[in-house]
Image (cartoon, rainbow, N blue to C red):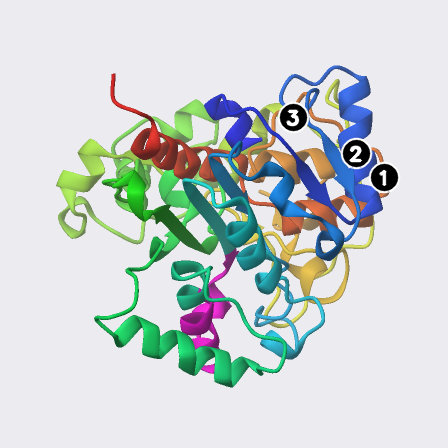
Amino acid sequence: MGAANVGLKHLAVIEWDSHSCKNIRENQQHGMRLVKDWPLIEGDVRDVNFSQWAGSADLVFGGPPCQPFSIGGKQAGRLDDRDMFPQAVRAVREIHPRAFVLENVKGIMGPKFTNYVNYIRLQLAYPEIARKRDENQEQHFRRLQEAHSSNCDPEPAYQVQTHILNAANYGVPQKRERVFMVGFRRDVQAKWSLPVATHSKAALIHDKLEGDYWDRHGVAKSKRPAAQLRLDDLDLDIACTAKPWMTTRDAIADLGEPGHSEFSNHIYQPGARVYPGHTGSLLDMPAKTLKAGGHGVPGGENMVVLDSGDVRYFTVRESARLQTFPDQYGFYGSWTENMRQLGNAVPCKLAQKVVSSVVDSIRPSA
């Protein structure tokens, strides 16, 4: 959706999860603008022949499953059957796009996966040096390293950069740190840099201390939390030039109480409770990272702390707001299933920022 907002035409959208595909199809049938023309392919990405889009696709983008690398999982990495980075590399090799954007959890940058990330980066830089049938990953890695250190072999086919971005710094009402691997084909000669952060914590604190944050939301002075910082403690250059971080309250205040709203998917979900280490998101800060699930650790994270001090689960519509999905996009499964999809998603606004910067770098000059 972020790419669609940039104005890109999708040649294929590949997704194996039937519930996610059902939601896309339902929205297509309802004429939802951003998805209505998507050529949706439901199936295993390992069965897809990417070469059919060779020469016609400018950009490959997507998020290989994060579960093999998430700190909330077993962190089996490349030994996890859900690791689809080999398929992402294959897509780049077979399509040979002008650029690619891949997204994953911050956990992949941990020391446990350093060698594997370096292996992925080298495969993306030299996609034509494919793994041989009789070659294991370690042997292939060494061959790529030798090619990279040699002056005799061809230059990398792609220039690859890896960055960690916090979605809150780009206007998303959620503290969500994600890794982006961005690559440009050598002949494109792109001059790309990270999209400039537009929002900051310092500006939010300034807005609370000197701005109209509390008045805008009608929060009585007696209900306002005590200020923990003074203006003297802030970087006023940042506070005065950036926009404030978007808070949970900013995102959901106009929805009203669950079940008493004209907004779809804004239904109360019972059963929320606090337990050690999982206390929900504060209303007046960006939300914690939404997790892909409804109970256990994900359920403990996917809660909001109300002004009364009580907690409840985020509704599906509130969660969609935190992920910056448009209100026009409907969700048609169960709360648990939709929360899983939302927890796995890239915030639309963050995707738009990154993809837009990449498109600007590869667009031919006028």
Alpha carbon separation for disc pair 3 and 1: 20 Å
Three-letter code, disc 2: Asn
Q: Residue type at mark 3?
A: Leu
Does 2 lie within the magenta span? no
User: What residue range appears in magenta?
Assistant: 104-120
| Residue nearest the observer in this picture, 92 or 360 | 92
Assign a secondary structure to mark 3: helix
Q: Position of residue 343 (x, y in %)?
A: 65, 50
Query: What crowding class fits label 1: few (fewer than 14 Cα within 10 Å), some (14-19), or many (20 or more)?
Result: some
Q: Which mark is residue 333?
A: 1
Quadrant of image for the N terminus: top right
Q: Which mark is residue 255?
A: 3
Foreground tag (2 vs 1): 2
Magenta region, main secondary structure:
helix
Image spot of residue 222 (x, y percent): 45, 39
Which corner quadrant of the image does residue 238 belong to?
A: top left
Left or right, residue 162 beside residue 335 = left
Please tell me in which quadrant of the rendered image residue 36 appears: top right
Quarter of the image that includes the C terminus = top left
Residue at mark 2? 23
Q: Residue at x 77, y 43 (%)?
A: 338
Q: Amino acid at mark 1?
A: Gly
The answer to which of marks 2 and 3 sits earlier in the sequence is 2
Look at discs 3 and 1 and give the one toward the viewer: 1
| Between discs 2 and 1, the one toward the N terminus | 2
Could you say where residue 199 lies in the image, as x and y percent from the top left? 32, 38
Tell me which residue sits at (63%, 62%) in the image: 84
Task: Please name whichever residue, 349 or 287, is drawn nearer the observer in this view of the structure.
Answer: 349
What separation in Å lies between label 2 and label 1 (alpha carbons)? 8 Å
Q: Quadrant of residue 289?
A: bottom right
Q: Which mark is residue 211?
A: none
